[in-house]
Image (tube, rainbow, N blue to C red):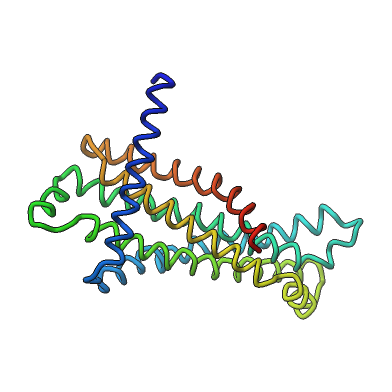
Amino acid sequence: MTEGGLLRRSVVKTGQLGILTARGFWALLRPPYEWRVWIVEMEQVGWRSLGVAAITTVFTGMVLALQTAYSLPAIGVKYYIGTVVAKSIVRELGPVLTALIVGGRIGAGMTAELGTMKVTEQIDALRSMGTDPVKRLVAPKAAASLVMLPALTIIGDLLGILGGLVIGVFQLNLTPGFYINDVLDAVTINDVCSGIGKSFFFAYFITIIACHNGLTARGGADGVGRATTDTVVLASIMVLVSDFFLTKLFYILF
């Protein structure tokens, strides 16, 4: 593909994502509200992703505490493990790793579901019955992601700090009280707001990319597979790239 063709494709896709965003949020705000569908989607996005999010953040906190203590012993950083772990987890690693791991799971699932409906003409059937596919399919997924990904991020932050506590107590001979006091002194409300704020943007990027790729999938099972792969790759890139700009923005705001 030539540079001009790639640029044109990127512009077209950006426009399509913008249109789907507007339609999705309008459908999200417009009654009637299908609460049962929203709850089912929240269970799919949140509860079923809790295990992988917990494992990721707990061991990230443990590794971070261990590496920090063993890499910088000369400056006495061992006694500031709580500060290092809490700041890193709450502001950066918690929201980013949760978005990457959970986002890959839920994004692939959304694209596979919508893509299968697209190639089997179920989306066209909904339109023929006067049902808006965006209202019926995209809006509940957006609502679930915007609620559950920040919730998973909060849980992940707490578990990551707990993982650091385990290493601090059993490997570095710190007392639990010392570690917890260090965490409470280090973490501010601005840190918490920054991390949770990022998770809302990550949830949006993951959902809108997944739904767009699913709704535009073509070519049978092979096309659905390509769309699913594209979702995981593009959503991960968007999370990492946007994290840089959101970090700069939140440091200015907070």
Q: Is 166 on the left-hand or right-hand side of 158?
A: right
Q: Quadrant of residue 31?
A: bottom left
Most distant residue in the right direction: 74
Quadrant that contains the N terminus: top left
Question: Could you say where residue 188 lies in the image, as x and y percent from the top left?
Answer: 69, 71
Closer-to-camera residue (181/211): 211
Question: Could you say where residue 152 lies in the image, as x and y percent from the top left?
Answer: 49, 66
Question: Could you say where residue 107 lies in the image, as x and y percent from the top left?
Answer: 38, 51
Q: At x 8% / y 56%, what residue is drawn?
A: 129
Most distant residue in the top direction: 2
Q: Quadrant of residue 156?
A: bottom right
Most distant residue in the left direction: 129
Q: Quadrant of residue 118?
A: top left
Q: Is 150 on the left-hand or right-hand side of 143?
A: right
Q: Is 147 on the left-hand or right-hand side of 243?
A: left
Question: Could you say where residue 127 lies in the image, as x and y percent from the top left?
Answer: 12, 52
Quadrant that contains the C terminus: bottom right
Q: Is 181 on the left-hand or right-hand side of 210?
A: right
